[in-house]
Amino acid sequence: MAERTTLRSLIQGIAGAIASAQQEIERQQILNLGAFFDQTLRPLMMSLRLPSLRHGVDPGTEDLVDIPLLTLLPHNPLRISEAQVEFDIELGGVEEGGELDSPNVIQETDDAHEKVAPQPRVRRILTDAFSGASSAKGPKAHVMIKVRDAEVPEGLARLLTELNKMHGMRQAPTIEPT
C-alpha cells in the first residue's frame, strides 16, 4: 500500500522546495559575484587601449584604461516569480483530531503576551500522491518555475558605483611596428 500523507504536509514540502530553490539561486549569484575578485578581494581589472584625450599629447598616442570587470556586465538578480505544480492525488478521507494543531491565537487582553490559547485540533485530509491515480504508467507531476529579474540590491548598487570610480588611466607604452 502506498504511503499516505496529509495535504498540509504535501503543500509544506512543495513550499519548502520552492524556498530552497530560491536560496540556491541566491547562493549561485553570490558565487558569481565572487568570480570578479581575486584571492585578496581586489576587483579583477581589464586594461583597454584607447586613444588619448589628454592635452598636449602627440596624435596617435594611446592610454590604457583599467576598468573593473564587474562594471562591464549587467547584474540583475533572479527571483522565482511563479511556481506551478500539477499532480493527481487520491484523497484518503478526513480524520478528526489530527496530529497537527491549528496555529495559536493571541487572546485580546492587556497581557496578550502571556495569553496564548491553542485552538482545537484541526481535521486532516489524507492524500496519496504516489498511488498512480493519474495514469496506468504511474503518477505524474508537472513542475513549472518562472524566474524574473529583480532590482539590484542596494549593496551591489553601491559596490558598482564605487568600482565605476576606479577607472584608472595611464599612458600606454608605444607599440613598435613589426
Image (tube, grey):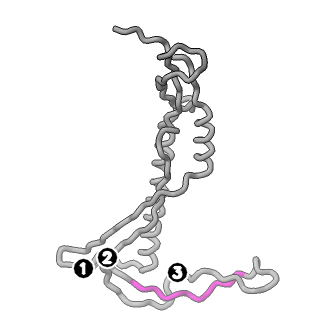
Q: Amino acid at mark 2?
A: Phe
Residue sitting at 47 percent across and 26 percent down?
Answer: 48
Please report the residue visible at 49 percent of the width from the left and 88 percent of the height from the top: 123
Question: Which comes sooner in the sequence, label 2 or label 3?
Answer: 2
Q: Nearer the viewer, mark 1 or mark 3?
A: 1
Task: For marks 2 and 1, give the CA distance.
Answer: 8 Å
Name the mark on residue 87. Answer: 2
Up/down of 100 relative to 73, above or below: below
Residue identified by numbered label 3: 100
Mark carried by residue 134: 1
The question of residue 58 being in magenta is answered with no
The x, y position of residue 64, in whole percent, is 51, 22
Q: Residues within 10 Å of mark 1 (few under 14, many from 20)?
A: some
Q: Identify residue type, mark 3.
A: Leu
Quadrant location of the N terminus?
bottom left
Disc number placed over residue 171 in the picture, else none: none
Residue 156 horizontal side relative to residue 74, left or right: right
Question: Which segment is the magenta one?
Answer: 116-126
Q: Mark 1 or mark 3, which has the lower sequence index? A: 3
